[in-house]
Amino acid sequence: MKKDYYNVIGVMSGTSLDGVDLAHIQFHIKNEKWAFEILECETISYDLNWISILKTAVDYSEIQLEELNKNYTQLLASIITNFISRHALENLDAVCSHGHTILHQPQNGFTLQIGNLPEIAQLVQQKIVCDFRVQDVQLGGQGAPLVPIGDRILFHEYDYCMNLGGFSNVSFEKNNIRIAFDISAVNTVLNFYASQLGFDYDDKGKISRTGQCNPDLLNELNSLDFYKTPPPKSLGFEFVKEIILPMIERYSISIEDKLHTFTEHVSIQIALALENFETQKNQKRSMLITGGGAYNDFLIERIQFHLPEMQIIIPSAKILEFKEALIFGLLGVLKMREEVNALQSVTGALHDHSSGIIYSC
């Protein structure tokens, strides 16, 4: 018999390398309607050594990746264990962990999220639900995005759910089918250039705002083939490293101009992505924006400029910062209930399925 209450931890590490997000969540289900409460939550930052490792691991050999996976699994286990101890959490049903994406090549039938080795259950001494992407890729899907089913279940009152993290991705319903896809790189690029000025990120977009838009670079960015490809589609850091950064570096312009131009590029691509699916133009719609990019005032202003009829909603800090950890918590619960947590309509897999692996301690 399925339960109507779950007490879990959701764990997420994103491509922007902000750190490991942990959220203690209580889920309730009644009459097939889900409700949630985010209790304790925090982000544990990576130290400079781990940031360097995770940035460069895309170029690691197979042997180096195996060693990295072991070390990262131990790191993640210690972070989770400390979180449980610090907040005196008891009676957990599971820890639902995404791990950290190092390689994402669904076109080659391959994706790698480190931190999902079986020993993590013994290290944490909890049931672990993890490795949510591999099965979808094996079924011919993109392995991403996985958050949209959470958007459908937990945030259905919004027309669009937009995440502005390392990459932008959107989720929405069209003809009772969930549509979702990655749109463009965001903080993977903005943080890269902010770091060249000695900052972890461009606070509120203040640096970007001082720059000028370079029309030639903007046109070249907007002409990338990825934007012409219909969904389902997803992006990995390889796209940034191999295509975006080399393109920007060909231009001898200031860091401020690079940031401004790329911010404009992101906002244009978001507007185009949504407009391509709008059947009724100029109709008032609502869009929930989460992820670190929601704090970038300049980026939000530019999105609003290109989508003047859109009502943009920035939620509470807990939801804004921990929405992905929240939804991976839900994905873990759905996996334990043997219910669908990955949608064919958004990943392109052969069929809907219940993805992930469960490790018992």
Image: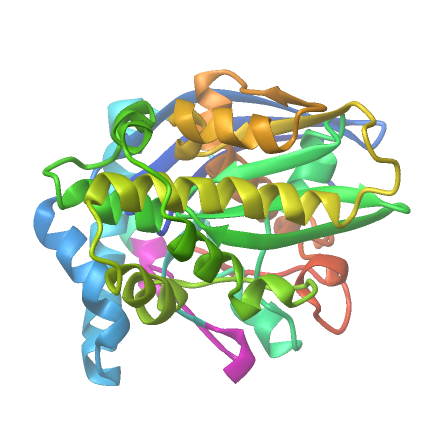
Q: Which residues are magenta?
A: 105-122
Q: Nearer the viewer, residue 29 or 327?
A: 327
Please tell me which residue is depicted at 65% across the width and 68% down the height of the picture: 229
In the image, farthest residue toward the top: 316
Judge whether residue 67 can be spotted in this image. Answer: yes
Q: Is residue 354 left or right of residue 69?
A: right
Regarding residue 149, the answer to whether it shows in the image is no
Residue 118 place in picture, x, y as percent: 37, 65
Count of numbered circles in the view: 0
> In terms of image quadrants, where is residue 356?
bottom right
Quadrant where the N terminus is found in the figure: top right
Q: How is the image coloured?
A: rainbow
Q: Is residue 316 left or right of residue 174?
A: left
* Residue closer to the observer: 187 or 40: 187
Residue shown at the point (51%, 57%) measured from the top left: 222
The question of residue 342 being in magenta is answered with: no
- State which quarter of the image contains the C terminus: bottom left
Residue 241 in the image, given as x and y percentages of width and height: 31, 66
Residue 109 part of the magenta segment? yes
Percent of width and height locating residue 217: 38, 56
Left or right of 102 on screen, residue 139? right
The answer to whether residue 122 is above or below residue 21 is below
Relative to 299, is 352 above or below? Answer: below
